[in-house]
Structure formats: structure tokens, C-alpha cells
Amino acid sequence: MCQGSRSARRHLREMNGPMMRLQRASAIAALSLLTWAATASAECSWIMWWGDRNPWQPVRAYSTLKACEADLPHGTSRTAWTCLPDTVAPRGPKGAK
């Protein structure tokens, strides 16, 4: 193998190194952005709950609190209706007795 081809390969590696790092960083940034967007949209869910003390039952999901509260029934007796974020359940934490 001649000396010229080795230096040419080394030169190509040196030129491609920063470009490969840039491509890798761009791919990681894009995946992070997609993950962040998916979790951000999932955080905006509201659940309408119905219950006469226990057990509470989920009735319907809404994208906003305003939409959930607009659908709450009025004038019903002996029942409780409430809107809570999807991360909160009126039944309490799992495993609680």
C-alpha cells in the first residue's frame, strides 16, 4: 500500500468525523423533541369522575378542564361529579387500603 492512500484515508476520516457527530447530535435532538411533544400532549388530559362515595368511576376524558367542567351534570342527587387531571384519581393511590 502506498503512503499517499493512507494519508488520503486519514484526511477523509478527519473531514467526516465532525459531520458524523453533527448528524448524530441532530438525530438525538429530533428524537428528544418528539418525546417531549408526546409527553406534553399527554399531560393535558382531564377525567370526569362519578361516584357516590366509593367506588369512583371514570366517565369521560377531556383535553381541557373547561370542557370537562362544561359537561358536569347539574341537579343530580346523592351523586358526586368532579373533574381531575388524569394523574390524580379520587380513589386514592394504588395499593392503599
Image (cartoon, grey):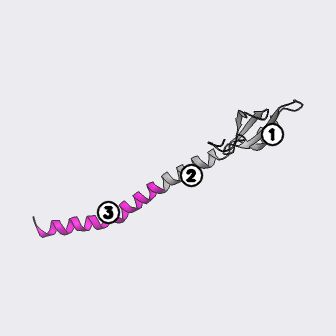
Query: Where residue 18 appears, x then y in whole percent?
Result: 36, 65
Taking the spot 62% from the left edge, 49% from the top edge, the residue there is: 40
Taking the spot 49% from the left edge, 57% from the top edge, the residue there is: 29
The majority secondary structure of the magenta stretch comes to helix
User: Which-is-in-front pick, marks 1 and 2?
Assistant: 1
Q: CA distance from mark 1 to mark 2?
A: 27 Å
Query: Where residue 60 appears, x then y in whole percent?
Result: 71, 33
Instruction: Indicate the amino acid at tag 1.
Output: Glu
Residue that mark 1 sits on: 69
User: Is residue 15 covered in magenta?
Assistant: yes
Relative to 23, say whether 62 is above or below.
above
Q: Is residue 25 visible?
A: yes
Mark identifier at residue 16: 3
Residue that mark 2 sits on: 36
Q: CA distance from mark 1 to mark 3?
A: 57 Å
Q: Say which element carries label 1.
A: helix
Q: Residue furthest left?
A: 1
Residue 91: quarter of image: top right
Of residues 95 and 62, the one nearer the viewer is 95
Q: Is residue 67 visible?
A: no
Instruction: Indicate the amino acid at tag 2.
Output: Trp
Q: Earlier in the sequence, mark 1 or mark 3?
A: 3
**Magenta stretch?**
1-28
Instruction: Indicate the amino acid at tag 3.
Output: Asn
User: Is residue 67 covered in magenta?
Assistant: no
